[in-house]
Each structure stands twice: as C-alpha cells, then as structure tokens.
Image: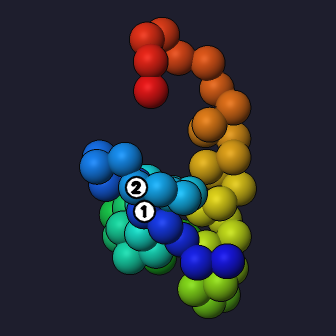
C-alpha cells in the first residue's frame, strides 16, 4: 500500500502525515548510528509509518482535527 500524504489541503484517502524520506531524516537525527533496528527497505518503513498512524489516529485530542 502506498503512502498518501496529508499536506494540510484535505487530501482524499490520505493515510500519513510524513513521507518515508521525512521519517528517515527524523530517525537519523535522533538515533544516528544507534539506529540498529532501522527498517530494511522502503516497504518495511512504510508499514512502520502506517502502524504509527493507526496509533496516532486512535488518540483523543482536545479540539477538532
């Protein structure tokens, strides 16, 4: 399943707020060489992002989305 990025313009069918490149940059900046458990390829990274989005979207926040 390909990531469809929500960029603030109400993208129909969006399933993520970040791209694979953005996720990798975030993880590299925080963990660097200690990132021993990095996903093996883009498909694994995508699956990780989708699981994170499932968790994030289940959370309750004040206000509206």
In the image, which disc is placed on residue 11? 2
- The quarter of the image holding the C terminus is top left
Residue located at (69% from left, 41% from top): 55
**Between residues 38 and 64, which one lies in front from this camera angle?**
64
Work out whether residue 17 or residue 34 is closer to the camera in this orientation and state it: 17
Is 36 placed left or right of 10 in the picture? right
Marks 1/2 in contact by CB < 8 Å: the verdict is yes
Decide if residue 59 is on the left or right side of residue 23.
Answer: right
**Res 36 quadrant in image:** bottom right
Which of discs 1 and 2 lies nearer the camera? The answer is 2
- On the image, numbered disc 1 is attached to which residue? 5
- The residue shown at (62%, 37%) is 57
Q: Which picture quadrant has residue 28?
A: bottom left
Element at label 1: loop
- The answer to whether residue 63 is seen in the rendering is yes
- Asked if residue 44 lies left or right of residue 24, the reply is right
Query: Where does residue 12 sit, x and y in percent of width and height?
Result: 47, 56
Disc sitting over residue 55 in the figure: none
- Residue 41: % across, % down: 62, 89
Where residue 24 sits in the image (x, y, percent)?
43, 72
Q: Which of 41 and 13 is in front in this view?
A: 13
Q: Which residue is drawn at 60% across and 62% down?
A: 49
Q: Distance between the residues labelled 1 and 2?
A: 7 Å
Which is more N-terminal, label 2 or label 1? 1
Q: Residue furthest bottom?
A: 41
């Amino acid at each position: 399943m390909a990531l469809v990025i929500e960029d603030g313009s109400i993208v129909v069918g969006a399933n993520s707020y970040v791209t694979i490149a953005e996720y990798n940059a975030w993880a590299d900046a925080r963990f660097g060489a200690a990132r021993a458990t990095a996903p093996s390829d883009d498909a694994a990274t995508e699956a990780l992002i989708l699981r994170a989005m499932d968790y994030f979207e289940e959370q309750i926040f004040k206000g509206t989305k």
